[in-house]
Image: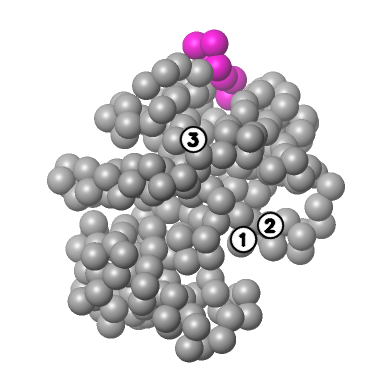
């Protein structure tokens, strides 16, 4: 089943009156349960595509649908609701709340969904324990290693049981061994049926995906996709 479908998607920005085409005529399908890497050099359009896939931005041209639901027809509130329930984000810089414990960081998305305090804590503890962080529940980000912070970020991404995890350079700030641990976790999640989309310029990260989609100058190249 197709989960994410982009058809002839373009994204144009206006800068000092000049049109900058960040994406041009991108057509990509990602099936439920796939692990796909979107790769390309800096300036290729990866970040713009990530923002569109994650419903953080809308295309200027074309059509984007999630599980058959066309994003362009949604109001901002509907888009926010779809994003919070369907997509879990993992960022290179972790994006954890400072001065807040690992448990509180992971529980935060449930707060916005109106989940009660006791249930938020129970689910956050279970998510952190699943990622081997049961002894770090009360630790703040500054008390955690980079690898531990990224595992907290993954737990936070999973807490709402999203259909897809969108990981933007998930190992970019990590030493090699910690990056390998994070990639192993993402592979395990994919093996369990979770759809994973990796945004990366790192060929070692891209290599673990079942499929690679190459971008250059805002366009899909190499026949759209390549097997890993």
* Colour pattern: one colour
- For the image, the number of numbered tags is 3
Residue shown at 48%/80% (left/top)? Answer: 120
Whether label 3 touches label 1, CB < 8 Å: no
Q: CA distance from mark 3 to mark 2?
A: 20 Å
What secondary structure is marked by label 2? helix
Residue 20 visible in image:
no
Whether label 1 touches label 2, CB < 8 Å: yes
Give the label on residue 134, or none. none
Residue shown at 29%/78% (left/top)? Answer: 137
The stretch in magenta equals 216-224
Quickly name the residue at label 1: 85
**Mark 3 or mark 1: whose residue is earlier in sequence:** 3
Q: Is residue 123 above or below residue 18?
A: below
Quickly name the residue at label 3: 34
Q: Position of residue 2 (x, y in %)?
A: 64, 34
Nearer the observer: mark 3 or 2; the answer is 3
Nearer the observer: mark 3 or 1; the answer is 3
What predominant SS class does the magenta segment belong to? strand
- Outermost residue on the left side: it is 177
Quickly name the residue at label 2: 82
**Front position in the image: 47 or 162:** 162
Quarter of the image for the C terminus: give it. Answer: top left
């Amino acid at each position: 089943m197709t989960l994410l479908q982009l058809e002839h998607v373009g994204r144009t920005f206006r800068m000092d009156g000049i049109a900058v085409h960040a994406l041009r005529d991108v057509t990509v399908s990602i099936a439920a349960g796939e692990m796909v890497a979107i790769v390309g050099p800096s300036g290729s359009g990866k970040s713009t595509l990530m923002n569109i896939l994650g419903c953080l931005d809308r295309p200027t041209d074309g059509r984007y649908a999630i599980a058959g639901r066309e994003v362009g027809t949604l109001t901002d509130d509907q888009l926010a609701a779809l994003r919070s329930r369907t997509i879990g984000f993992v960022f290179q810089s972790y994006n954890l709340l400072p001065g807040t414990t690992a448990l509180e960081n992971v529980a935060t998305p449930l707060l916005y969904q109106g989940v009660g305090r006791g249930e938020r804590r129970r689910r956050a503890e279970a998510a952190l324990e699943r990622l081997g962080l049961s002894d770090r529940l009360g630790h703040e980000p500054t008390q955690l290693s980079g690898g531990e912070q990224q595992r907290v970020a993954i737990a936070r991404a999973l807490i709402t049981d999203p259909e897809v995890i969108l990981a933007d350079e998930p190992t970019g700030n990590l030493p090699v061994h910690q990056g390998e641990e994070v990639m192993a976790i993402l592979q395990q999640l994919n093996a369990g049926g979770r759809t994973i989309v990796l945004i990366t310029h790192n060929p070692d990260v891209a290599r673990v995906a079942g499929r690679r989609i190459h971008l250059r100058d805002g366009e899909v190249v190499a026949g759209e996709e390549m097997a890993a």
